[in-house]
Amino acid sequence: MKKVKYEKLEDVQQRLLNEAEKVMNTAYNPYSNFYVGAALLAQNGMIITGSNVENAAYGSTVCAERAAIFRANAMGIRNFSKVAIIAKGKNFDTDKVTAPCGNCRQVLYEFAQVSGRNLEIIMATTKMDKIVIATIEELLPLGFGPKDLGIDMKKYK
């Protein structure tokens, strides 16, 4: 894991954060009033975004990271190299980066195995004054995915 300044990010990392910031404002969040945006970089260069969608049955809520992955999957895209995440409250900016929850880490790990790479996770505060970059293996050590079950992932790539 490393802390970086926005100006030191690669162009593609900046674009991902900017797209995550834009989509963050589309969150459906009547219960928490917490806005989260995520932007995935597909290996073909396409950026796919998602925002959180809450539900009165709280367990049915979908986080921004999973919304982006599910959207990409519906488009037939399953190979990713990076994801950016940014969040804010209704009346406040975040002063710490927002990391993926446990469910999202598991889904990200799954698609990292599908992609055949250690997915890069870019996490930023609302003002992008604090940015942390980690890999999914750093965020989910000793992860368990389809390869661990002996699943041949070729048909899912």
Image (spheres, rainbow, N blue to C red):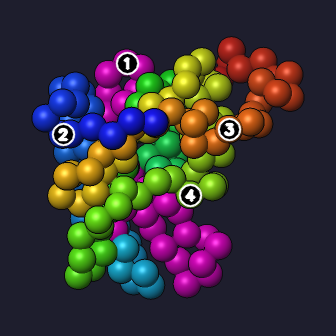
Instruction: Please tell me the numbered disc located at residue 101.
Output: 4
**In the displayed image of the protein, which residue is found farthest to the right?**
149
Q: Select label 1 or label 4 by which is in front.
A: 4
Q: What residue is shown at x 18% (from left), y 58% (from top)? A: 127
Q: Amino acid at mark 3?
A: Pro
Q: Residue at x 45, y 31 (%)?
A: 120
Name the amino acid type tagged 4: Cys
Asked if residue 95 lies left or right of residue 14, the reply is right
Residue nearer the viewer, 96 or 71: 96
- Going by the numbered disc 2, the residue's amino acid type is Tyr
Identify the mark at residue 6; answer none if there is no mark: 2
Q: Specify the quadrant that holds the C terminus.
A: top right
* 56 relative to 154 in the view: left or right: left
| Horizontal and vertical percent position of residue 5 | 20, 39
Residue 34: image location, x then y, percent: 37, 73
Within 10 angstroms of label 1, few (less than 14), some, or many (20 or more) residues? Answer: few
Sequence-wise, which precedes: disc 3 or disc 1?
A: 1
Magenta-drawn stretch contains 137 = no
As helix, strand or loop, the secondary structure at mark 2 comes to helix
Name the residue tied to disc 1.
44
In the rendered structure, which amino acid carries the disc numbered 1?
A: Asn
Q: Which residues are magenta?
A: 35-64
Residue at image position (77%, 30%) is: 146
Q: Is residue 72 left or right of residue 34?
A: right
Residue ID for mark 3: 141
